[in-house]
Image (cartoon, grey):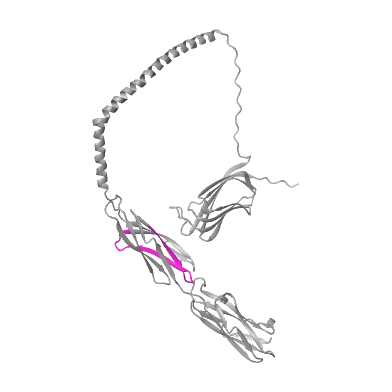
Amino acid sequence: MSTEAYLDADLIEVGPGSEASCRLEIRNTGPIVESYTIEVLGEPAGWASVEPPVVTVYPGDSGSAVVRFQPPRSAQVVAGDRPFAVRVTPAESPDAQVVPEATVRVLPFAAVTPEILPRTSRGRRTGRHEVSVANVGNIPLGMALSGSDPNNRLVFAIRPAELTVAPGEAAFVQVRARARKLLWRGQPVTLPFQVDVVTDDLPPSRLDAATVQEPVLPQGIGRVVAALLVLALLGAGLWYALLRPTVKSLAEEAAQEQVAPVAQQARAADTRAQEAQTKADQAVAAASAAPASPSPSPSASPSVGVPGLPPGARSFSRRLAVTAPTRATRTDQYTVPSRRVFVLTDIFLQNPQGDEGRLDLVIDGTTVQTVALQNFRDLDYHVVSPIEVPAGAVVSLRVNCRQAGTALDGVGGGGGQCRDFALLNGYIRTVNRTPAP
């Protein structure tokens, strides 16, 4: 080869937001003057440069260039080693290019930006807040959150209290500040507090917030109750003194007018009833005098059949449950036993937390149901034509969790995890083996 190229370092360390460099030596062993184009290859090429980008070298002589690395101070460039190469291409003979290789090491840095919203909440007992913690460094950070107030009048519930946030991502933590005692009446009271965010590699961050505790009984409730009581007493006195006698006399007159025609109708009805009774007695006497005729024997009425399971089948149900972290996909599955067929007649899907993402029901490798999680809490499907799942086939519930909803008390999940279910109903029947001929 007529070209030789070497890097003066195998490993270059550089911190985000700073600069590091190495030298590239090029030797022309050919018989003609050659111009070389220099290009950085690999992931570091996005934040690397070459000075000068073109080097001219006489025969038997050597030249050099400087390769500079300037990674941005951003979570997009994660700490760690990244291999790279420098391609040196001769202008006169491009096929004779050389590619020396080395490694650049991006040093770690930690940075976090916490924020609490709202800064001030209101409630009779509990103030609800949300802390967003963004990791703007280039390494994962473990964090712990705790609450405190100067007057020890609040109790804090933080979920989750400990978490790990990847570079460039943000986590959201629910904070509830609950007053130790109720405020029955009086003026609202402002209760300040702080939330501390502690990380392994950074000083603690303190967020100031407050909750305004409102009284259970609003101001002026005593005057309103007294006024209502006075009005009630005045109304009662007016009723007994003036309105009640008048209403009573009017009611008696109206009742007499209504009772008179009703009494006439009752007497007429009594007369018609006596006549009907007389005719009935005559009919009975005539019937007893007539000869009796044989009556046909009642025939047994056919019983109505109730659809049942096929012979050898038994009812069967299976519940699939999936717990998936945010931005992850998880699956739960059921395999039909040998010499069995699972006949699926009903599907019931549950999303109790209100998760967001995608749910797929896959039967023997075929997706039969796809639903967006944010569009339902409970879905019930009755399969018009039952689905037969043969022995050895797999029924899978697959969940892609985009954002987890609020965890139900006592159920589990939450804290960045979706929790979804599918109840499969139907029956199992046995498949007899066909005897060999």
Position of the N terminus by quadrant: bottom right
Q: Position of residue 87 (x, y in %)?
A: 63, 80
**Image position of 253 (left or right of 57):** left
In terms of secondary structure, what is the magenta stretch mainly?
strand
Nearer the observer, 27 or 270: 270
Residue 414 position (above or below residue 60): above
In the rendered image of this protein, does residue 70 appear above or below residue 299? below
Answer above or below: position of 387 versus 267: below
* Residue 133 within the segment the image draws in magenta: yes
Looking at the image, can residue 159 be seen? no
Q: Is 73 rendered above or below residue 149?
A: below
Quadrant hosting residue 251:
top left
Image coordinates for residue 405, horizontal then vertical, percent: 47, 56
Q: Nearer the viewer, residue 262 or 420?
A: 262
Q: Residue at x 49, y 12 (%)?
A: 280
Q: Which residues are magenta?
A: 128-154
Residue toward you, 19 or 419: 19
Name the image quarter holding residue 263.
top left
Q: Position of residue 362 (x, y in %)?
A: 60, 53
**Residue that sits furthest to the bottom in the current view:** 60
Residue extending furthest toward the top: 289
- What residue is rendered at 58% in x and 78% in y? 84
